[in-house]
Image (cartoon, rainbow, N blue to C red):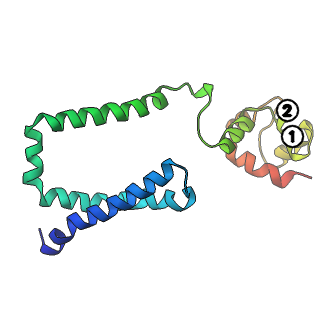
Amino acid sequence: MPTLLSRYATPLTTGLFIVSLVSGVALFFHLGSATFHSMHEWLSMVLIAPFVLHLWKNWRAFSNYFKRPAMAVALAVSLVGAVAFAYPALTADPAAGRGGRPEFAVLRAMQEAPIAAVAPVFGQDGEGLAERLRAQGFAVASTDETVSTIAAASGKSATEILAALPAQAN
């Protein structure tokens, strides 16, 4: 390994880990989320390179951990922790609703509501909104259809229809 990389592998791993630690703790406590979110994601990705260099530099000492039960226990506990967080999300019924930001829940509800119910939000009645959507090339058979159904019939995404709705409001 070149000396420059060897010299900076551990210090960069340490520095980026501290940044990741501070930003992760701030995100956990919802402090400065707008500031820390991108920083945490991007610098955690950058951390991969010095981490790999650090492993390469210290491979012999690191590989000795695999000869002891502590590494197997630590990896097993880590895997159980990861599964405990991932399993509920992977097995959740999508129809039962998802977590996340409330504004996305509102958008999902609008996508699954009949356009007759969505129309008043945009100052329209159901038939008026249906006509406006038809005029823009969307396939609307009835005001009882949902935005998602209309999108599928039109070969578009529900987001494209929702994006067109505010421009149609009177």
For the point 81% across and 52% down, which residue is it? 166
Image coordinates of residue 84 in percent, x first then y, are 40, 30
Q: Are marks 2 and 1 in contact (CB under 8 Å)?
A: yes
Between marks 2 and 1 in the image, the one whose residue lies nearer the viewer: 1
| Residue 119, disc | 1
Number of marks: 2
For the point 70% across and 48% down, which residue is it? 160
| Residue 152, disc | none
> Observer-nearest residue: 52 or 24?
24
In the rendered view of the protein, which quadrant contains the N terminus? Answer: bottom left
- Helix, strand or loop at label 1? It is helix
Q: Give the crowd class for mark 2: few <14, some 14-19, many >=20 residues within 10 Å.
A: many
| Residue 143, disc | 2
Image quarter of residue 47:
bottom left
Image coordinates of residue 77 in percent, x first then y, are 28, 33
Image quarter of residue 11:
bottom left
- Which is more N-terminal, label 1 or label 2? 1
> Observer-nearest residue: 14 or 56?
14
> Observer-nearest residue: 145 or 136?
145
Classify residue 167 as left or right of residue 38.
right
- Visible residue check, residue 154: no
- Visible residue check, residue 95: yes
In the rendered image of this protein, does residue 140 appear above or below residue 160?
above
The three-letter code of the residue at mark 2 reads Thr
